Amino acid sequence: MDELRDLYQEVILDHNKNPKNYFQMDEATHSAEGHNPLCGDQVEVFLKVDNERIIDISFQGHGCAISKAASSVMTTMLKGKTITEAKKLFEKYQHLITAEMSEAVDLHEYGHLAVFAGVREFPMRVKCASLSWHTMLQALEEKKEIATTE
Amino acid sequence: MNTTLQQFNVEKIRTDFPILQQEVHGKPLVYLDNAATSQTPTVVIEALQKYYREYNSNVHRGVHRLSHIATDAYEGAREKVRRFLNASSLQEIIFTKGTTDGINLLASSIGRGLIKPGDEIVISAMEHHSNIVPWQLMCEDRGARLRVIPINDDGEIIFEAYEDLLNERTKLVSIVHTSNSLGTVNPLRQIIDLAHNKNVPVLVDGAQAVPHTAVDLRALDCDFFVFSSHKVFGPTGVGVLYGKKEWLEKLPPYQGGGDMILNVTFAGTKFNELPYKFEAGTPNIADVIGLGVALDYVQQIGYDAISSWENELIQYALKRLQEIEGLRFIGNAKHRAGAISFVLENIHPHDIGTILDREGVAVRTGHHCTQPVMQCFKVPATTRASFAFYNTKEEIDLLIKALYKVIEMFS
């Protein structure tokens, strides 16, 4: 059960129950839809960008606890960040959730994202944890296609 | 001791399956994902080994000793399949890569051979993607129309709607025998009779039927039947398409190549007779032989014994699952087999699947390649426990115990 507790930390379960920034943003400047074809998870990410800075971000959709918490935490982390900062943070986050178990990871560097460190013990769940981030990037790049985790 | 246990020695049967003797994450494996793929008994594994160790060679062409043995074993498997299905002729048994391949073969050949713009194909709302997409592709190509029989809240087809869909434009009804995501067993007798009254042929997707029930094609009288080896305790990568001879003779070949020809010149090619007309290229010889051994094995246990044991398992599982607060079944058909799908209030199936896995319990979570079914029931996904004759009531107890752990974690 220890690895399970690593994965399903209280913070993640809380975000799953009461996700932050969970609404449809009508005044969004950017938005995109993301699908995980494997499990049918679906998320829509909305951003309001002004002068290369994310001034508001929200999401909607359905998915597992990991995917919902990942979306929720992402929105709290990215509000106020520049687009470049957001992209950098995604790279860092991806490393956190996919790093080899043998690799030492300094959790202090990750702030609120650190709660997702347990994901790397569950390779099948990496896609759940990254779908909303891929979708956020897709929205920023204003691509018309739907983002997928494939 | 109860009577079924005396007739059906499940513990002894389990020793035939080496894969079941292992631990997963330090817990005994509880394999309840049989609708995705079934496990392989030692006799089948040994048959595959024997083929590669002793007589691996190509069929239907060599004059040498090994080719002769391989051809006999390959064609022997065809006879085993014929007997298994109670088909009338070996010419009606075509080896494919699997159920999906069989349906694609038919969609392609029927499309090119029989379908004109405006024609209609009828399927049901509970089909697997493999019995939807090939028909969509073909209909798009031929300007035909795909019609769908709706299902009710219990996951049963609505018969009156089916009757209304059949008309003079209907060229084929393609229907699942047993649903992989709902466990529904369809009333095939009535479905086939109604289609035949209007001279419409019927394809039955038997992938989820053959692991649980005996099939008698001469009694069923469907025109086509498909199934996969790996769902009936055989190897992956092989399946069977049965077709009535009069239909198969009418249809154009699917793929061209070696083995499916009688004579090739650049002016034209004369196709081989049935069933070889539909078996282009070197077939999956070892796995076809393995399938034959698997069918022998399952018939030795006997479908009467299998059905009654599995029915006992399913009734027990339904009863135990019902005790869980907040659990809702997806699919409540009166006649069911194989699988039980359910959702837990406020807990996503993927989270359930991950936690069950850590308890050693293997189930399927997701849409089970039946997204339209999920849309019918307005759920994104379900958790599915699916059974085989080697499962036990103790394993169901472990599933229930693990589900309580899920609920505890999310409470």
Image (cartoon, coloured by chain):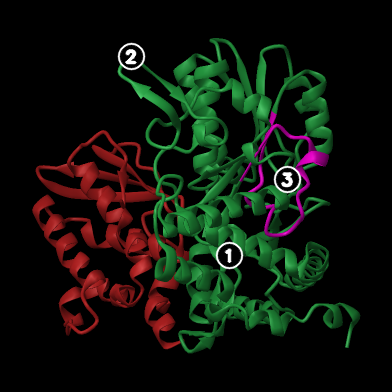
Chain colours: A red, B green
Disc 3 designates what residue? B155
Residue to which mark 2 is pinned: B267
Q: Mark 1: few, some, or many residues within 10 Å (few <14, many ≥20)?
A: many
Task: Quadrant for the C terminus of chain B, please.
Answer: bottom right
The chain ID associated with circle 1 is B
Q: CA distance from mark 1 to mark 3?
A: 24 Å
Residue B404 higher or lower than B230, as above or below:
below
**Helix, strand, or loop for circle 3?**
loop
Image-based side of B19 in relation to A131, left or right:
right
Given contact means CB atoms under 8 Å apart, are the residues at marks 3 and 2 in contact?
A: no
**Which one is in front, B180 or B233?**
B233
Pointers 1 and 3 within a single chain:
yes
Select label 1 or label 3 by which is in front.
1
In the rendered structure, the answer to whether residue B218 lies left or right of residue B238 reads right
Q: Which residue is mark 1?
A: B38
Check disc 1 and give the amino acid type.
Answer: Ser
Secondary structure under the numbered disc 2 in the rendered image: loop
Residue B246 coordinates in the image, percent (x, y): 67, 25
Task: Compare marks 3 and 2 and give the one earlier in the sequence.
Answer: 3
A77 to the left or right of B183: left
Q: Which residues are magenta?
A: B202-226
Q: Nearer the viewer, mark 3 or mark 2?
A: 2
Query: Which residue corresponds to the image point at 88% horizontal and 88% vertical from the top-left?
Result: B1
Disc 1 or 2, which lies upstream in sequence?
Answer: 1
- In the rendered image, residue B7, in percent from the top left (x then y), is placed at 85, 78
Q: Visible in this render: residue A20?
A: yes
Tag 1–tag 3 contact (CB < 8 Å) = no
Res. B305 image quadrant: bottom right
Which residue lies at the image location 74% right of the left edge and 34% below the top edge? B222
